Image (cartoon, grey):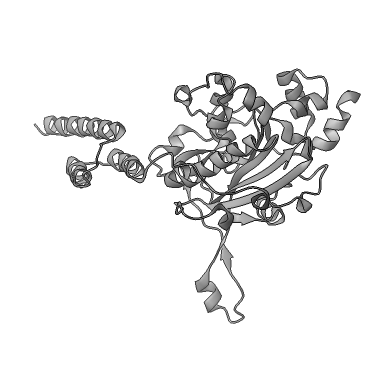
């Protein structure tokens, strides 16, 4: 056991987690674990040690109360990704969202039922696109709900957040390692009415956020991504922390608008970020060392997002009249191309409501 003393002291993890790491990676020392291309970030310490689960290419801490991850961490290695650049990648089309976590008890897990017709998309923290370079298991594990998924605004997920993910991945072309800690945030808002009504004019804040589904999965008000980059030869480092609201964001907003200090992010999240081996507060700001311009295009155009939202409305229709009124509204939009998923949702709901109507008529007769 002596060979793991260093790992215990710098990783701040439990014996169970160490055992899992040893079993899954079959390593013989902590140094071997740190050399794993996707787990290199652990040399700077884990943000917390609660409810940890270890997957092939990321580590997560699950919030049992909120049914979502508190944080997800992983690294991108330039050498590793370069070695895989000419090989075929794994397609996410074969992956499905699932609730089977490693250790979280069943009653603390989110399910797909929680998300259906909720108005919120299933947003990856460790994006599938960062884990498509090895095998099917690695990308499939990014679809585990409470381990790596949070309720996310669809426009945010498919557009601004997607572009941040692309930006982080592109950093691996410039730096030897890109270490990423990402997750949800719950930030209170000022209650102006209560503030105006108290004699001392004391600021009043309240926490307001939605919960969805039978398991009451909590919807974060914001999302964060903390990125530490380094070049192992030149010992160059830079860090950037970004907090974005869980809502649509104008594509022209610069990423720097959402930059926060690592100290402020730690205060908001209750996490310790890259807190070992280096004084991260002295590390230069990422956007001073490289361009933080979001250059990639959106994953989903506004017209498609609108049609996806209409799918949910179609599924919630309870009468034929309601369905036909909604479908007339959709037809009046005169989309260039009607999404197959929307047409399928309409056909299915139309058949269902016609059957119900026929059954009702027979009962009357």
In-image side of 9 versus 351 (left or right): right
Location of residue 128 in the rendering, given as x and y in whole percent from the top left corner: 53, 31
Pick the front one: 358 or 20: 20
In-image side of 174 versus 123 (left or right): right
Location of residue 350 in the rendering, given as x and y in whole percent from the top left corner: 20, 33
Pick the front one: 193 or 159: 159
Q: Locate the C terminus by quadrant.
A: top left
Q: Residue furthest bottom?
A: 199
Q: Locate the N terminus by quadrant.
A: top right
Q: Say if residue 56 shows up in the picture.
A: no
Is 286 rendered above or below residue 311? below
Q: Say if residue 320 shows up in the picture.
A: yes
Pick the front one: 76 or 210: 76
Residue in the image at 32% along x and 44% along y: 303
Is 222 rendered above or below residue 341? below
Figure label count: 0
Residue in the image at 56% along x and 34% along y: 107
Residue in the image at 50% along x and 28% along y: 98
Residue in the image at 73% along x and 51% along y: 284
Quadrant of res 267: bottom right
Location of residue 242 in the rendering, given as x and y in whole percent from the top left corner: 61, 51
Location of residue 145 in the rendering, given as x and y in whole percent from the top left corner: 53, 33
Pick the front one: 157 or 106: 157
């Amino acid at each position: 056991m002596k060979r793991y003393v260093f790992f215990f002291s710098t990783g701040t993890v439990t014996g169970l987690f160490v055992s899992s790491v040893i079993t899954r990676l079959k390593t013989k020392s902590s140094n071997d674990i740190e050399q794993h291309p996707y787990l290199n970030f652990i040399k700077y310490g884990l943000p917390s040690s609660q409810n940890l689960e270890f997957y092939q290419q990321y580590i997560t801490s699950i919030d049992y109360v909120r049914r979502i991850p508190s944080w997800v961490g992983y690294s991108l290695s330039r050498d590793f990704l370069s070695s895989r650049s000419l090989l075929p990648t794994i397609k996410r089309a074969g992956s499905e969202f699932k609730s089977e976590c490693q250790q979280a008890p069943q009653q603390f897990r989110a399910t797909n039922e929680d998300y259906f017709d909720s108005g919120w998309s299933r947003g990856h923290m460790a994006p599938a696109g960062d884990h498509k370079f090895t095998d099917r298991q690695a990308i499939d594990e990014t679809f585990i709900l409470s381990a790596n998924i949070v309720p996310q605004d669809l426009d945010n997920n498919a557009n601004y957040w997607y572009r941040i993910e692309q930006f982080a991945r592109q950093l691996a072309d410039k730096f030897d390692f890109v270490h990423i800690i990402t997750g949800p945030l719950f930030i209170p808002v000022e209650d102006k009415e209560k503030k105006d009504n108290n004699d001392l004019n004391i600021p009043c804040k309240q926490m307001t956020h939605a919960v969805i589904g039978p398991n009451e999965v909590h919807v974060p008000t914001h999302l964060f991504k903390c990125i530490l980059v380094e070049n192992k030869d030149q010992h160059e480092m830079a860090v950037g922390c970004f907090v974005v609201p869980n809502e649509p964001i104008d594509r022209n907003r610069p990423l720097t608008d959402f930059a926060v200090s690592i100290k402020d992010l730690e205060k908001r999240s209750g996490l310790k970020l890259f807190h070992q081996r280096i004084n991260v507060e002295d590390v230069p700001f990422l956007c001073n060392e490289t361009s933080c311009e979001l250059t990639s295009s959106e994953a989903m155009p506004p017209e498609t997002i609108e049609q996806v939202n209409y799918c949910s409305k179609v599924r919630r229709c309870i009468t034929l009249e309601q369905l036909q009124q909604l479908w007339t509204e959709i037809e009046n939009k005169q989309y260039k191309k009607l999404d197959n998923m929307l047409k399928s949702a309409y056909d299915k709901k139309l058949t269902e409501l016609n059957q119900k109507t026929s059954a009702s008529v027979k009962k009357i007769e």
